Image: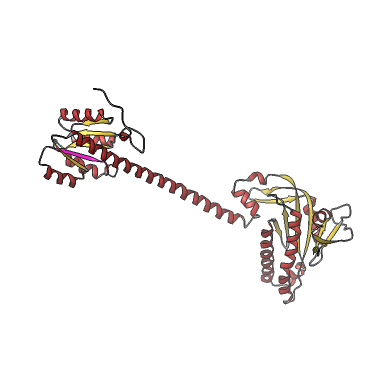
């Protein structure tokens, strides 16, 4: 007998494979006839001649549908049906029960056992084929829903894992930002260690220092010293972040900030001088507050621009991201020369900002560590025009 090619209706919508049917009957002639007729219609068919054999085949080679006689020695069709319904993996397996007994009474028992459909002997084959097609369509939809639910669980698991990693990265970034400049912390968390490798780059360096701080610490209560430093650092740190500066370190009352590294920025010199002007303004109420308590403190600032060596320095248990060379030293020396409320800048910085900011030259400065006098300028503010 020739076998017809399977039509699309005989394929599983979730896997694209031929639908698999298990036919169970203790009468071998009956089981072979049903199996052959179903194979002709393009299904993959296995057979079993007892309830025990049917359960074993369902376990080892799960079918898409079960066509089973009720009256069999040993486990009958009802018991097989009940056992299959008791297992989560076969709870929705479509089952068609077939019997030669009283159709009405057997149908009720079959429904109670969990059967999906019921046929009487002698079997009306066109009716059987129609019911098989209908139940396989339902099974295909159930498989599709089950597959979608599985994919959704997998997506949720991946999403939860991604969220956990992101939360962990955010928490780690928050902790790192307490010890590193935000740009450096973000590079570490993002795995951008190459940004932190030793290199040379042109940067603009800003150095801040408190005037009168040594005298203040000699006279003030230790808690007052800490209060002043907290207010100073909080105010300075907020403004440094706003302008995108890299805060290198605190050295007591001295603070070093640079621009254009590790992440390049536009107009680093303009950012630096505008930040310095805002820092001086922000420090005025702090100075006024302590003046009312009898303590005179003020802020001096030095700015220099040029190439420096940058990278991570330190040892295994303590690392810092630092700028090394003449430019950071020059900014520190200019800061040392600046009076209270004054901002001194070097010639290169003045060339970059002179078109937008008002400056005035000062006498060439003989600075420690520099053999030649340094040309410097006092920063006055924005140009009036």
Which contiguous range is marked in magenta?
A: 92-99
Query: As rendered, which of 40 and 279 lies closer to the eye?
Result: 40
Q: Residue at x 67, y 51 (%)?
A: 320
Residue 75 in view of the camera: no
Is 265 magenta? The answer is no
Residue 48: horizontal and vertical position, in percent?
21, 32
Left or right of 265, for residue 47: left
Query: As rendered, which of 71 and 256 lies closer to the eye?
Result: 71
Badge count:
0
Left or right of 174, for residue 313: right
Farthest top residue?
Answer: 1
- The image quadrant of residue 11 is top left
- State how the image is colored: secondary structure
Residue 187 in view of the camera: yes
Q: Which quadrant: the N terminus?
A: top left
Query: As rendered, which of 187 and 361 lies closer to the eye?
Result: 361
Farthest left residue?
Answer: 102
Q: Residue at x 59, y 56 (%)?
A: 175
Residue 16: horizontal and vertical position, in percent?
36, 34
- The image quadrant of residue 298 is bottom right
Residue 181: horizontal and vertical position, in percent?
66, 55
- The image quadrant of residue 82 is top left
Magenta: main secondary structure equals strand
Residue 342: horizontal and vertical position, in percent?
80, 65
Q: Which quadrant: the C terminus?
A: bottom right
Query: In the rendered view, would you say 168 is above or below 30?
Result: below
């Amino acid at each position: 007998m020739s076998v017809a090619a399977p039509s699309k209706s005989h394929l599983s919508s979730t896997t694209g494979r031929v639908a698999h049917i298990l036919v169970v009957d203790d009468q071998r002639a009956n089981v072979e006839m049903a199996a052959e007729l179903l194979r002709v219609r393009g299904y993959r068919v296995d057979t079993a001649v007892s309830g025990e054999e049917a359960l074993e085949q369902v376990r080892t080679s799960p079918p898409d549908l079960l066509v089973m006689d009720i009256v069999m020695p040993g486990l009958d069709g009802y018991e097989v049906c009940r056992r299959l319904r008791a297992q989560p993996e076969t709870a929705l397996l479509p089952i068609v029960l077939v019997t030669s007994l009283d159709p009405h009474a057997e149908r009720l028992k079959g429904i109670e056992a969990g059967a999906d459909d019921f046929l009487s002997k002698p079997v009306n084959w066109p009716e059987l084929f129609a019911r098989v097609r209908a139940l396989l369509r339902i099974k295909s939809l159930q498989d599709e829903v089950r597959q979608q639910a599985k994919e959704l669980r997998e997506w949720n698991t991946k999403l939860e894992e991604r969220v956990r990693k992101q939360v962990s990265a955010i928490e780690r970034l928050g902790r790192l930002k307490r010890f590193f400049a935000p740009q450096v912390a973000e590079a570490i968390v993002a795995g951008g260690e190459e940004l932190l490798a030793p290199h040379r780059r042109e940067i603009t360096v800003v150095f801040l220092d408190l005037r009168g701080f040594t005298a203040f610490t000699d006279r003030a209560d230790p808690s007052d010293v800490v209060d002043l430093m907290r207010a100073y650092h909080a105010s300075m740190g907020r403004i440094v972040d706003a302008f995108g500066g890299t805060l290198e370190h605190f050295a007591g009352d001295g603070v070093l900030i640079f621009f254009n590294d590790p992440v390049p920025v536009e107009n680093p010199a303009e950012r630096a001088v505008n930040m310095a002007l805002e820092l001086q303004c922000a420090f005025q109420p702090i100075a006024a507050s302590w003046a009312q308590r009898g303590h005179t403190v003020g802020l001096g600032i030095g700015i220099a621009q040029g190439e420096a060596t940058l990278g991570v320095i330190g040892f295994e248990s303590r690392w810092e991201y630092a700028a090394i060379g003449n430019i950071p030293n020059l900014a520190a020396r200019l800061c040392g020369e600046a009076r209270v409320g004054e901002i001194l800048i070097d010639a290169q910085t003045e060339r970059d900002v002179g078109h937008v900011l008002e400056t005035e030259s000062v006498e060439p400065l003989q600075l420690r560590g520099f053999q030649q006098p340094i040309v410097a300028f006092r920063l006055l503010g924005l140009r009036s025009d």
